[in-house]
Image (cartoon, grey):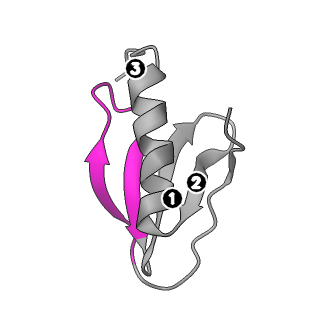
Amino acid sequence: MYAWEPHVPSSSRPVRVMETSCCGEYEWCCEAGLFFVLRHTKRNGYEETGRGRHATARLVWAALVSTHNHKRRAS
């Protein structure tokens, strides 16, 4: 299980979405040289987990996309 925290931009640089899970639940992102997984919540806006260097954050991304239950996103 991963700790999700509210996403607070760490710089004035834009967040770049590098990949999106099949149903759009998770986004693999980069911001100012750090990588993390982002998800949208109705309550808090965006939350993130796994922020750090590429190799560490990529392990979090791989674990999340391989085990999530492919929710359908409401339009």
Above or below for 52 versus 19:
below
Q: Mark 1 points at which residue?
A: 56
Q: The disc labelled 3 sits on which kind of residue?
A: Ala
Say which residue appears at 39% left-offset and 16% top-offset.
70
Q: Quadrant of the N terminus?
A: top right
User: Residue 47: x and y, percent?
Assistant: 61, 48
Magenta highlight on residue 27: yes
Q: The disc labelled 2 sits on which kind of residue?
A: Gly
Q: Which of 8 and 74 is in front in this view?
A: 8
Confirm or deny contact between disc 2 and disc 1 (CB under 8 A).
yes
Above or below for 18 versus 12:
above
Q: Nearer the viewer, residue 62 or 6?
A: 62
Which-is-in-front pick, marks 2 and 3? 2
* Quadrant of residue 4 within the rendered picture: top right
Left or right side of 25 for 43: right
Say which residue appears at 39% left-offset and 75% top-offset.
14
Which-is-in-front pick, marks 2 and 1? 1
Q: Name the residue under label 2.
A: 50
Q: Is mark 1 on a helix, strand or loop?
A: helix
Magenta residue span: 14-30
* Quadrant of residue 24 within the rendered picture: top left
Above or below for 47 versus 18:
above
Q: What element carries label 3?
A: loop
Q: Name the residue under label 3.
A: 74
Q: Is mark 2 on a helix, strand or loop?
A: strand
Which-is-in-front pick, marks 3 and 1? 1
3D distance between C-alphas at marks 3 and 1: 31 Å
